[in-house]
Image (cartoon, rainbow, N blue to C red):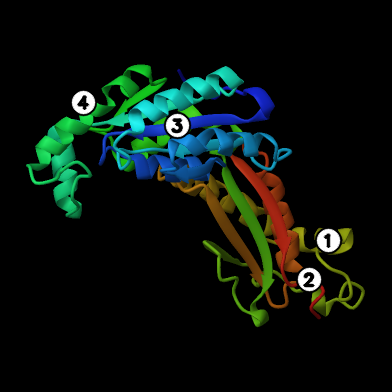
Amino acid sequence: MTGTQQVQGGIEVAVVSGLSGAGRSTAAKVLEDLGWFVVDNLPPELIATMVELGARSQGVVTRVAVVMDVRSRAFTDDLAAVIKDLDARGYRPKVLYLEATDAVLIRRFEQVRRSHPLHSDGRLVDGITAERALLAPLRDEADLVLDTTGLSVHQLRAKIEHAFGGESSTRTRVTVVSFGYKYGLPMDSDLVIDVRFLPNPFWIPELREFTGLDADVRNYVLSQEGAEEFLERYLELMRLISGGYRREGKRYLTIAVGCTGGKHRSVVVSEALASRLGQDDGMTVKVVHRDVGRE
């Protein structure tokens, strides 16, 4: 099964399980990035309560994902009962099961130097075999089984996004921040644009008291030589960069646009850049003017 399904109470429910070392932690991080409320290793008897609370949150929580492993030895029987109970209540959970070959799991455990939860005094492969047998009934009931043997982290992310993310949740969320260099760089900026190469409206008496949000200032800045060409060239660069970010799983990007005081040029360019980036189907864009009003 691919995609997500809306169920009773306007809430979606997912259960993530599978073999230790097969990628549960990665799956949990991806679901969090997609806007799911993720709970790790919640006792099975509390899952239905968590879902009910989410359903009554009046839209605050719309997606709940529970990540389960075998640290609770009796968890498979308990979890099967919980899934059946949720289904009876109208909250049909989507079950994601992650697995990999024994050789790959052994290599992953050796790389991180961790013990298997069912390792005990035997060999590592004995723990993997025991876990595989314990989880076999759950695997048979899973909606989606992902074999991560040959998958990179980015490939696994892409598959989970395809299965659990809506169209909007897989977009790059871009924040364009205008700022003044005299107040310092925004600490969370990923990319910084310096637009002090454009003439400063501050030196035009009839424009000095206005900001880049005013039409006269905007028209003045964008009419300057190089302004439009700069925007077009930077948009081409952003399309290249954002495509790479999406492939690498980066979903949040902050672009800082700076001028001297953060009042005129940076505001105009931020608004123009955000407007044009917003026409890209792969981006959701918002604008923040950090230093407007500080003078």
Residue on which the image places disc 3: 15
Tag 2–tag 1 contact (CB < 8 Å): yes
Q: Earlier in the sequence, mark 4 or mark 2?
A: 4
Query: Which mark, by number, is residue 213?
Result: 1
Quarter that holds the C terminus: bottom right
Comparing 186 with 108, the one in front is 108
Q: Nearer the viewer, mark 3 or mark 4?
A: 4
Q: Secondary structure at mark 4?
A: helix
* Residue at 54 percent of width and 51 percent of height: 252
Q: What whole-number distance in Å separates the C-alpha atoms at marks 4 and 2?
A: 62 Å
Residue on which the image places disc 4: 133
**What amino acid is labelled 2 in the image?**
Val
Dot 1 crowding, Cα within 10 Å, few <14, some 14–19, many 20+ = some
Dot 4 crowding, Cα within 10 Å, few <14, some 14–19, many 20+ = few
Q: Earlier in the sequence, mark 3 or mark 2?
A: 3
**What amino acid is labelled 1 in the image?**
Leu
Residue on which the image places disc 2: 292
Q: Where residue 265 sits in the image (x, y, percent)? A: 73, 67
